[in-house]
Image: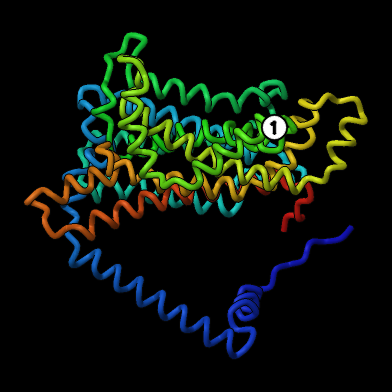
Amino acid sequence: MTMPPVPSRHALGRRLRSELFASPLDGVISVALIVGLAAAALGLGHWATTQARWAVIQANSTLFAVGRYPEPQQWRLWLLTTLLAAAAGLSWGLLRGLPRPDRPAQRWPRNDRLALLLLITLALLVPVSLKLSVVIQLRWWLITALLLILRWAAGRWAQRIPGHWQRWLPLLWPLLYLVGMVLISGGLGLIQVPSSDWGGLLLTLLEASFAILLCFPLGILLALGRRSTLPLLRWGSVLYIEFIRGAPLITLLFLGQNILGFLLPGGLAPERVWRAAWVLTLFAAAYVAEAVRSGLAAVPRGQMEAARSLGLPLPLALLHVVLPQALRVALPATVGQFITLLQDTTLLSLIGLSDLLFVAGTVMANPAYLGRNAEVYLTLAVLFWCCCAALGLGSRALERRLDPNPLPSS
């Protein structure tokens, strides 16, 4: 029986020396980068703690979060946040608790422990630093505790869940999305909240999530249509993709806001928020189609021929053989498009929608907060970075799970 190697106390030092100071030039570059990053971090920390005036964020935290959403109805958003935290904890625990082909189940790997520490730190410090009320602080702490408890419980008992239940668990997120739409907009006995009252981070995430969810299947259909042997379908897909990719998004947003009201009969044109959401969806679908087309081109033609020789009809051969391989190749480019789409939601402020950038402009126009632009824009940058980083981390985790030849776990 082979015993695992015992880690040396000098292993970290040897690793740093080999990665950062392998040669004199590497050492000079590493030292210069470390000094530059340390100076930038110290300068930012000094400004944030001594010169910045964070009262502009503290006084307008609700406006940045939900815009003008009616205060008596904000309990719906707290309920939705609680449901999202519960679903995230369950999904996180199940992903870690169920074994993978390349390694056994790991309940608390190193990255999860770091994420746990970060979540606890944010939950404890952010509500206090923003000087939120005691009630709101308690809500945040309880929501964080719920997420972590469900993460622990799901990871501990994941392997006891029957296999047929595990196959249905991914449907929890689409169902939760529909429940969230009902909670936000109203219906089923809830008071209607007009979309004109939605704003801030709520509107940004809503527009981005709607476009991401719909542009992916539309992009797949466009990519398949562009490779079709039917001339009308192929050239129609080509014209659509090339037209959308050749037009600036802001132009399409203005067209969507102004032309739909004339083209559709009275009462059938969607509200301004949903017009923008559909424009974002149709715009992103053209770029996703090109990413999927590159994935389809990377799949050898022999895969389709082998599937057809086994008796699979064309739709099933595409669905079960070709598309899984193509989407695995196209995943990085597709997620990159999703991140770009999230950043493009800042253009909604130019057409009068109360997204994060519009709210920031409204706050900075207040005479009481003149000159506080740096604090506001830094807060927006951190919020967007967190959302984009979450998409990037999810993409890398999905790539590792879909990798047909995973590297052995260290």
| The C terminus, quarter of image | bottom right
User: Which x, y percent locates residue 233?
Assistant: 65, 30
| The N terminus, quarter of image | bottom right
User: Which x, y percent locates residue 135?
Assistant: 24, 33
Q: Can you see residue 95?
A: yes
User: Which x, y percent locates residue 241?
Assistant: 56, 40
Compared with residue 1, is residue 62 higher up or lower down, i.e. above or below?
Answer: above
Which residue: 66% across, 29% down?
A: 232
285 to the left or right of 201: right
User: Which x, y percent locates residue 175?
Assistant: 51, 21
298 to the left or right of 275: right
Identify which amino acid the numbered label 1 is placed on.
Pro
Q: Can you see residue 105?
A: no
Residue neighbourhood size for the residue with mark 1, other residues' Cα within 10 Å, grouped as few (<14), some (14–19), many (≥20): few
Task: Tell me where residue 314 sits by quadrant.
Answer: top right
Which residue of the protein is positioned furthest toward the right in this rendering?
A: 309
Q: Nearer the viewer, residue 245 or 292?
A: 245
Q: Nearer the viewer, residue 326 or 203?
A: 326
